[in-house]
């Protein structure tokens, strides 16, 4: 729990406050109303979500904290992002939520009343009470340090949920089910989020559209990136600018991997140079202000043209992705699209003579991981769902997922012909399951080698 109510925290650049200054600071402030456009975008959809949760836990108190600030060093914290299920249930997605708690209080046998415990604004007139001067002295929560937050009545209007002072909890969570200590509640919160409602699909499409713009920015920036000794970082920065300008930021650490770095699945060091003879694997996603993220990968020839060997590897991965996408439909097993993609990869590797045949699991030496996952508020969304509802379950209309097969041909792999070593290719798209198949949400980004070359050419001409 947060340390509320608190004495003002002091840190390295706080100064002591004289009595005269304290008196002055407590006076002569005009009202500062919430901005007129302040609103909770998801307000209309959160009551149905809470009702679905309520129905799973009749008569039980549910305690869903937003999470706490994490210290980066000394008196500096990491940027705060609320726990996804808290955001999903309340619609509150901002940096001003640390320490806040949603309590679903049983009321009657089949219902709950939601109460949000929030840190109210600190008064500007009280120069003696427990919050004295917090608005200008408390570097973590004071509004002159971190910005204005809604007061309880304002938060109630914004969220449609009854709000109470966090101090009423006395610095501890009330007894009840709490997701970090209760796998059944954590699983329920994940499973309730497996199927996206129409509003969520819109948010995910927005994330995909901003991500598309970010990929275009990166291609336009390639000449500068190629000239920089740490071109991978330049690319990460260009994408990050788009992500931060359009949304909350990136939904996960960007992977900008040139050449053999692409054979490291989560290459986020991004400290390498770029060479025009290499492929660049860019795996990146913009997270919206509502906290929904895209997750897209394109593998691009840094010269603008695939070499014959690059094209050969790319085309096999694309064929695998097509097979995976074709396997998506309601009722199909979640694992089917991965198996379909892997069949194509194994057959391709056998055709190249890398594998003796397409049977068994030796193809996994070159693919390493599974070919996709649910996508939503978290990049690997709903990961705490029980296996029978997700990994061993069947697809349902409204689920959003990635299909992302890859080939990772390690530079030191003696089983490979030398011309293929050191190449990593992944193609990753975001799809929503429809009544009879799936809709590609990321179709604005090209996937075939010819279309990739044409798209890069047009953007580089523009640059
Ligand atoms: N970037 C993580 C993933 O593709 O799943
Ligand atoms: Mn992914
Ligand atoms: Mn990805």
Image: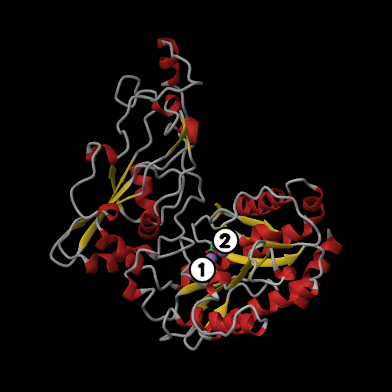
The residue that appears at 31% across and 69% down in the rendered structure is: 386
The residue that appears at 13% across and 63% down in the rendered structure is: 108
Quadrant (top left/top right/bottom left/bottom right) for the N terminus: top left
Q: Quadrant of ligand 3?
A: bottom right
Contact, CB < 8 Å: mark 1 with mark 2?
yes
Out of 283 and 278, give the one closest to the viewer: 278
Marking on residue 369: 1
Is there any visible trace of residue 447 in the rendered image? no
Is there any visible trace of residue 318 in the rendered image? yes
Q: Kindly tell me whether mark 2's CB lies below 8 Å from ligand 1.
A: no
- Outermost residue toward the right in this view: 461
Q: Secondary structure at mark 2?
A: loop
- Outermost residue toward the bottom in this view: 436
- The percent position of residue 170, horizontal first and vertical second, equals 22, 36
Q: CA distance from mark 1 to mark 2?
A: 9 Å
Does residue 96 appear left or right of residue 160 in this picture?
Answer: right
């Amino acid at each position: 729990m947060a340390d509320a109510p608190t004495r003002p925290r002091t840190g390295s650049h706080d100064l002591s406050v004289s009595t005269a200054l304290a008196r002055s600071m407590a006076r002569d402030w005009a009202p500062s109303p919430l901005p007129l456009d302040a609103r909770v975008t998801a307000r209309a959809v959160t009551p149905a979500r809470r009702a679905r949760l309520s129905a799973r836990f009749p008569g039980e108190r549910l305690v869903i904290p937003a999470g706490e600030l994490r210290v980066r060093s000394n008196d500096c914290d990491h940027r705060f992002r609320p726990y996804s299920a808290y955001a999903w249930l309340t619609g509150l997605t901002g940096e001003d939520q640390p320490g806040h708690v949603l309590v679903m209080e049983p009321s009657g046998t089949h219902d709950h009343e939601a109460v949000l415990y929030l840190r109210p604004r600190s008064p500007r007139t009280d120069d003696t009470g427990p919050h004295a001067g917090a608005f200008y002295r408390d570097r973590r929560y004071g509004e002159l340090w971190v910005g204005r937050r809604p007061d309880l009545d304002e938060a109630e209007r914004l969220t449609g949920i009854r709000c109470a002072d966090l101090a009423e909890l006395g610095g501890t969570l009330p007894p009840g089910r709490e997701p970090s200590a209760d796998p059944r509640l954590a699983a329920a919160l994940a499973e309730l989020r497996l199927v996206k409602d129409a509003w969520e699909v819109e948010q995910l499409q927005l994330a995909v559209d901003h991500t598309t713009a970010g990929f275009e920015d990166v291609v336009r920036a390639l000449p500068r990136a190629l000239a920089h000794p740490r071109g991978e970082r330049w690319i990460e920065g260009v994408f990050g600018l788009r992500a931060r300008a359009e949304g909350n930021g990136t939904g996960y650490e960007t992977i900008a991997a040139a050449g053999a770095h692409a054979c490291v699945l989560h290459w986020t060091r991004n400290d390498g140079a770029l060479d025009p003879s290499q492929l660049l694997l860019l795996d990146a996603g913009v997270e919206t202000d509502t906290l929904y993220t895209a997750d897209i990968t394109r593998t691009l020839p840094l010269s603008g043209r695939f070499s014959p060997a690059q094209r050969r590897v790319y085309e096999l991965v694309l064929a695998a992705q097509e097979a995976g996408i074709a396997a998506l439909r309601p009722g199909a097993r979640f694992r089917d699209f991965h198996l379909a993609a892997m069949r194509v990869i194994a057959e391709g590797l056998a055709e190249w003579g890398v594998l003796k045949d397409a049977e068994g699991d030796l193809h996994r030496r070159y693919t390493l991981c599974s070919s996709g996952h649910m996508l939503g508020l978290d990049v690997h969304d709903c990961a705490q769902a029980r296996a029978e509802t997700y990994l061993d379950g069947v697809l349902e209309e409204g689920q959003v997922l990635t299909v992302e097969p890859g080939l990772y041909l390690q530079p030191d792999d003696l089983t490979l012909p030398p011309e293929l070593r050191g190449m990593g290719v992944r193609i990753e798209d975001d799809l929503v399951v429809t009544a009879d198949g799936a809709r590609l949400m990321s179709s604005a980004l090209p996937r075939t080698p010819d279309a990739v070359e044409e798209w890069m050419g047009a953007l580089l001409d523009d640059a």
